[in-house]
Amino acid sequence: MEKRYSDYNTYLRQLFGRRVQKISIDAGLSCPNRDGFLSSKGCIYCNSKGSGTGLFAKGVSIKDQVKAGKIGMIKKYKAKKFLAYFQSFTNTYTSCDHMRQMFDQALSCEGMVGMAIGTRPDCIDVQKLDLIASYTKEYLVWLEYGLQSAHDETLKAINRGHSVTDFFKALELTSGRGINMCAHVILGLPGEDKNMMLETARILADSLINGVKIHLLYVIKGTFLDGMWKKGDYIPMEQTDYVNRVCDFLELLPKRIIIQRITGDPHSTELQAPLWAGQYRETFNRIQTCLEQRNSFQGKKYIKKEDKKS
């Protein structure tokens, strides 16, 4: 099925001439929203693993995680090129020396062509960006900033610990260094209606970002959101509503923005609700079908900033 948006796999194939697979890495770092610097509670949807594997805490080094990941990707996809994805928690929340050690360990393995670094917009500075930029001469580098919503009232409600202004300051600081920037967005956050979700898309459309990851807010065991859901204070999105919101979101983004993800893929042992969130392939296919039925595509309703003023 031909994609109606600028998908990540096609982008990577065009760059490297073959399939490229991401290998998720747990570097054992924390987050200022969990270690007490900003808060000890974390975001309401985040569990103790911080969207990661917990492998580092079990004594598995970064290099060994990459080696094991490569074996799995070679067996499943016959892949020969790989990206190191520093996924768990905040991967710039440490010293530059430690970051260099992390990156060098991962990239020293054969077949590595780049890395993606998950972080927060309030955990970056010039020195860290200079270090990250030094890798762009030999590798593809993506810096993934967790935004989640372009509404400060929502960020406060989910205990995010930073503002929308922090996000745009980080983009400005990162720009011009050869580093690709991706924004993480969550649909279905508490208190957000359709208009608020799509306003986030409109704001990102004219920003400096190069890519977007779109996630569903699902309930994971042991999180603050889990407690809200059990008390009836949070109701997850229905699958049909989510599919339609993703299509609406894509229509508002220009084609230059690479869509890295259109839904999440929670661990089955951790997922509480909605149960349909565990059906990744079905949701993925329904989004493709919805775009076809609408005769729609990424950027269909995008209006350039200068055209909005005229």
Image (cartoon, rainbow, N blue to C red):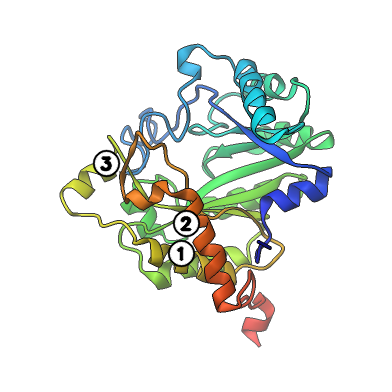
Q: Residues within 10 Å of mark 2 (few under 14, many from 20)?
A: many
Residue corresponding to mark 3? 224
Nearer the camera: disc 1 or disc 2: 2
User: Disc 3 versus disc 2: distance between alpha carbons?
Assistant: 25 Å
Residue corresponding to mark 2? 283
Q: Quick one: SS at disc 3?
A: helix
Q: Earlier in the sequence, mark 1 or mark 3?
A: 3
Nearer the camera: disc 1 or disc 3: 1
Q: Residue 286: where, in percent of width, then height?
A: 50, 62
Q: Is residue 126 above or below residue 253?
A: above
Question: Is 215 positioned to the left or the right of 110 in the image?
Answer: left
Compare residues 193 and 243 and report the one nearer the observer.
243
Q: Is residue 33 above or below residue 106?
A: below
Which mark, residue 243?
1
Which mark, residue 195?
none
Residue at image x 35%, y 59%?
A: 153
Nearer the camera: disc 3 or disc 2: 2
User: Disc 1 versus disc 2: distance between alpha carbons?
Assistant: 7 Å
Residue at image x 45%, y 35%?
A: 51
Q: Earlier in the sequence, mark 1 or mark 2?
A: 1
Question: Is 45 positioned to the left or the right of 174 in the image?
Answer: left
Q: Is residue 295 above or below residue 243?
A: below
Farthest-out residue, bottom: 310
Q: Mark 1 near mark 3, Cβ–Cβ under 8 Å?
A: no
Amino acid on which the number 3 mark rests in the picture: Phe
Amino acid on which the number 1 mark rests in the picture: Val
Q: Quick one: SS at disc 2?
A: helix
Q: Residue 231: where, in percent of width, then height?
A: 15, 49
> Residue 141's image quarter?
top right
Q: Residues within 10 Å of mark 3 (few under 14, many from 20)?
A: some
Q: Quick one: SS at disc 1?
A: helix
